[in-house]
Amino acid sequence: QVHMVESGGDSVEAGGSLRLSCIVSEYKTSKYFVAWFRRSSPEEMRAKIATLDTDDKTTYAGYVKGRFTISRDNAKNTVYLQMNDLKPEDTGVYYCAADRAEWLILQRLYDNNYWGRGTQVNVTS
């Protein structure tokens, strides 16, 4: 069972920056697909924000592209999400995930036992 511990969330003004961190246990981040998701409210499902594959290929949701950057430090087994030019609509709980393939993560979107506690980001205008 993989455990993810997210941190770095805070309250910031629009235009500010934050860097989120996620320590991944059990898996070696260099060998697995990693991603960040965001849930904007408890009623909404987790939405995929950014992904980083084992070949270092990245993908981003259109509304964060150019502002957010996903990266990893394999020596620390840690995944990061650098968030710049934050907007009020970026508010939400951010979660990271790591697994052998993206589809394994996507099939667990509604399984709360799969996810860590997340880290809260509040962006004020």
Image (cartoon, grey):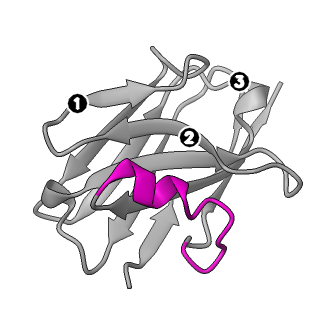
Amino acid type indicated by mark 3? Lys
Q: Amino acid at mark 1?
A: Lys
- Please give left or right for residue 101 compared with residue 43 in the image: left
1 or 2: tag closer to the N-terminus: 2
Question: Which residue in the protein does label 3 denote?
Answer: 87
Regarding mark 1 in the picture, which secondary structure is present there?
Answer: loop
Residue at the location (69% across, 64% down)? 110
Q: Nearer the viewer, residue 5 or 2?
A: 2
Q: Are marks 1 and 2 in contact (CB under 8 Å)?
A: no
Residue 48 is labelled as 2
Q: Nearer the viewer, mark 3 or mark 2?
A: 2
- How many C-alpha atoms fall within 10 Å of the one at disc 1: few (<14), some, or many (≥20)? few
| Picture quadrant where residue 63 is located | top right
Tell whether position 113 is magenta: yes
The residue where tag 1 is placed is 57
Instruction: Evaluate if marks 3 and 2 touch, with contact meaning CB atoms under 8 Å apart.
Output: no
Residue 15 is situated, as x and y percent measured from the top left of the image, at 64, 20
Tell me the kind of residue under disc 2: Lys
Task: State the residue at coordinates (22%, 30%).
Answer: 57
Residue 46 in the image: state x and y as whole percent.
67, 50
* In the image: residue 98, left or right of residue 11: left
